[in-house]
Image (cartoon, grey):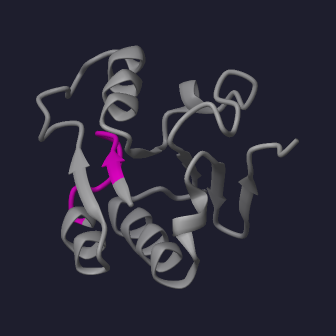
Amino acid sequence: MKIKLDENIPASLVASLTELGYNVDTVPQEGLAGSDDRTVWAAAQREERFLITQDLDFSDIRRFRPGDHHGIMLVRLRNPGRLALAKQIHEIFSKENVQNWQGCFIILTDLKLRIHRPKTL
């Protein structure tokens, strides 16, 4: 799975997710730090990457319908410090079968993991 970390996600996850076998890049690595959401989204889609972000601009499931993109995870922790974010995301990617998340809209909170999958006909 190819992953793009938004600039509000700890860069320390690049190494830990890469160790788990994922192809990871970041918005800052690509020179997109400070870019608008549309630019970040377009880059993730062009590169067929699963986007991980805390940005609530990506929270509208009607705008980011499952199946219309390569996948998105919105992380909403009560205390979203860098260590807590890195720990929670790494833990989920270590335990879950994330290969099945392509095209899904995922919401990760302190207590829940909600997976919205593409509708099948």
Q: Residue 28 placed where, x, y %?
A: 16, 37
Position of residue 59 relative to residue 4, above or below, is above
The residue sitting at 59% across, 45% down in the picture is 103
Q: Residue 32 placed where, x, y %?
A: 19, 26
In the picture as drawn, the residue positioned furthest to the bottom comes out as 95
Which residue is more in the foreground, 14 or 50?
A: 50
In the picture as drawn, the residue positioned furthest to the front comes out as 121
Q: Residue 62's image quarter?
A: top right
Position of residue 116 relative to residue 83, above or below, is above
The residue sitting at 32% across, 46% down in the picture is 4
Position of residue 94 relative to residue 106, above or below, is below
Q: Which quadrant does the C terminus fall into? A: top right
Position of residue 17 relative to residue 2, above or below, is below
Q: Is residue 4 toward the left or the right of residue 90 in the image?
A: left
Q: Residue 46 placed where, x, y %?
A: 33, 29
Give the residues drawn in magenta, as a range: 3-12
In the picture as drawn, the residue positioned furthest to the right comes out as 121
The residue sitting at 23% across, 45% down in the picture is 26
Q: Which quadrant does the N terminus fall into? A: bottom left
Which residue is more in the foreground, 14 or 88?
A: 14
Q: Residue 22's image quarter?
A: bottom left
Q: Residue 100 placed where, x, y %?
A: 60, 64
